[in-house]
Image (cartoon, grey):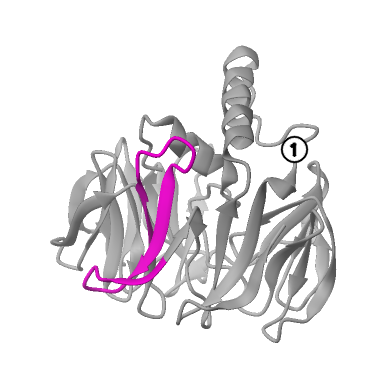
Amino acid sequence: MCKGKAIALSLFLFLALLPSSPAQEKPSPTLYPVLVNGKWGFINRQGQIVIKPQFGEVSQGFNGVGWFVGNNHNERKCVKDTAQVLSMENCFGSSCSEGLCTFLDSRFEKSGYEGLDRKVIIAPRFDMALKFSEGMAAVQEGKQWEFINHQGKVVIGPQFTHAKNFHEGLAAVCVNYKWGYIDQTGNFVMKAQFNLAGNFTEGLAPVCSYDHDFWKPFNCKYIDHKGRTIIEGNFDRADEFNEGIAKVLVQRNSILLMLKTLYKKWLSMVTGEKFKYLPGDDPWDYKVGYIKRDGTYFWPLQH
């Protein structure tokens, strides 16, 4: 991830429900997590609750998994788009796309790509490797990210501190702690100017900028392929659109969240462990809702 030095970025990452993964996928197209009275459940596209609110935590899945759920990291489970709640050993699906699958070498150090027949196509040499999308994949070698084709040839050279895959002809890339978008020739079509940037889906992409307000560090909105603002929602978090619906988040108690984030960072430095959640963490610190492409709410903000 492209990390800035601002404390506000740490706050945003604490709020983010997405776990870091080299092979993330967009959420399940049929289920959407909602927060009701401090517990997470799931609704379908008709707004009906299909999995009752019962979980203290929810985070976006990867490698074929829609969502991970649990309570204080105990008995973690996953939710798929069939509205099934599964044990972790039954969660994972394929990590393949465009006929190529990511895999790790025998030492679990480098990533490469193999075919559906398990034959190695691109030898493991990457520190991180994303799935192929639109004929290319973003990979990390050393400290920089680049793009390769199906033969493993570098088509856009190493020059980014982080990169995401191509979607709708554009890829979000990070340079000097700022995100922008490049086309498939590697040229910038939107200069690196955002603090955070998502993938384009359905013609729109979520982007967030640091607005220098200590109590509301991020202002997120949706832009089109030309960089024009389409939905100015003033959100603290905005996810990508999926079948006409996108999840958004608005903070309720910025001071409390900031103090919690700083405390967790201090604990991590002292103990050497990573703390995402602590006893007493309150999901009521923020509101979660879903919007449609016209900016109106499909599911209103709730906490």
Rendered residue at 62%/73% (across/down) = 28
State which quarter of the image contains the N terminus: top left
- The residue sitting at 20% across, 68% down in the picture is 184
Taking 115 as reference, is 142 above or below it? above
- Relative to the observer, which residue lies in front, 83 or 129? 83
Task: Report crowding for label 1: few under 14, some 14 to 19, many 20 or more residues within 10 A (C-alpha).
Answer: few
**Residue at the disc numbered 1:** 281
Q: Is residue 111 above or below residue 96?
A: above
What x and y, as percent, mark residue 160?
25, 45
- Residue 20: in magenta span: no
Q: Which residue is more in the foreground, 23 or 280?
A: 280
The picture places residue 2, in percent across and down from the top left corner, at: 36, 41
Left or right, residue 240 beside residue 168:
right
Instruction: Tell me the kind of residue under disc 1.
Output: Asp
Task: Say left or right for 259 vs 295.
Answer: right
Helix, strand or loop status at disc 1: loop
Q: Quadrant of residue 151?
A: bottom left
Residue 177, position as x, y percentages in the image: 29, 40
Instruction: Please provide the residue range marked out in magenta.
Output: 207-232
From this view, report whether residue 34 is shown above or below residue 46.
above
In the drawing, does residue 284 fall left or right of residue 120?
A: right
Task: Name the residue at 63% across, 42% down.
Answer: 253
Q: Position of residue 133 (x, y in %)?
A: 37, 70
